[in-house]
Image: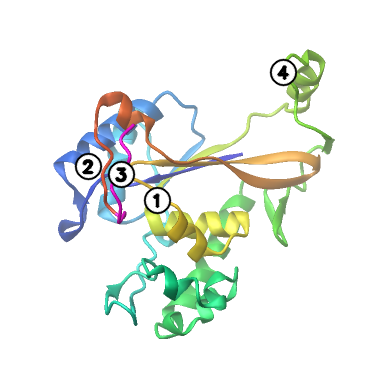
Amino acid sequence: MKIIFVRHGEPDYANDTLTEKGWREARALAERICKWDVTDFYCSPLGRAKATASCTLDKMNRTAKTLDWMQEFAYFIDDPVTGRHGVPWDFVPSFWSGDPLMKDMDRWVEAEVMQANPQIPAAYQNVCEKLDSLLASYGYVREGCFYRMPDAKERFIVRTIEPGDKKAAKNETENTASKEPVIVIFCHLGITCLAVSHLLNIPFQLLVHGFFLPTTSLTILTTEERWSNEAYFRVQAMGDVHHLLEKGVPVAKAGCFAEVFQG
């Protein structure tokens, strides 16, 4: 299975839509996605995500199902260092990295700054549960820190296929009889990091502070299904924007505190 998270185009936050540049980004993105064989499209209910999705959906004559729980994780906190009132990330390094709870996979919601907003723990649990429910509808059932495919044929692959190993490649193809589902979710930076955190068992604060996802960037995960009927998601690309570079559209800085590499 492949899950492709798409961050919305450059935002006009005041009007919850896209800037003129954001629309250019969305059109460049549509030129890329329209070549794919996508099983299902999903979208955040927020305007900037729906606007971004519209370029692709119109081009492909497709529709997307709205997932309310994939809206941005905008449960505001008061940053004790900077005084900022806003999203529960973008903390200064010494603050978030100095708190053991913030680096804990499950207990980051227990950190004092998070506890000040009682909506955060419940919202986090809801996202995890709804994501697992979505994956279960495609045959992937959460079991501890990985997923199991109860109805899948067992397979046992010891090592990756070496270049030129035609026999192994043939066996791999034969063992993959059915077409894998590919889903595309148009959403946001924070909620993408939260979802990836759950899929990979990496604390949310490490991901959201350690990775920048530019506007209209793609974060691509695929399941590795190599032992019995177990599956584990692995990132193949994170924050990929080559569709922008190919079209000569500059990579936007929205959500980043540094100058963005344009190469």
Q: Are marks 3 and 1 in contact (CB under 8 Å)?
A: yes
Q: First in sequence: mark 2 or mark 3?
A: 2
User: In the rendered image, which quarter contains the C terminus?
Assistant: top left
Q: Are marks 2 and 3 in contact (CB under 8 Å)?
A: no
Where residue 146 appears, as percent x and y from the top left, is 70, 54
Whole-angstrom CA distance, mark 3 to mark 4, is 35 Å
User: Does residue 11 appear to the left or right of 232 in the view shown?
Assistant: left
Whole-angstrom CA distance, mark 3 to mark 1, is 9 Å
User: Amino acid under label 1?
Assistant: Phe
Residues 161 and 35: in front is 161
**Element assignment for label 4:** loop
Residue at (27% x, 52% y) in the render: 254
Residue identified by numbered label 4: 163
User: Does residue 85 appear to the left or right of 44 in the view shown?
Assistant: left
Q: What's drawn in magenta, residue-wise?
A: 255-263
Residues 14 and 61: in front is 14
Whole-angstrom CA distance, mark 4 to mark 1, is 33 Å
Q: First in sequence: mark 3 or mark 1?
A: 1
Residue identified by numbered label 3: 260
Give the number of the mark in front: 2 or 4. 4
User: In the rendered image, which quarter contains the N terminus?
Assistant: top right
Whole-angstrom CA distance, mark 2 to mark 3, is 16 Å
Give the number of the mark in front: 2 or 1. 1
User: Amino acid under label 3?
Assistant: Val
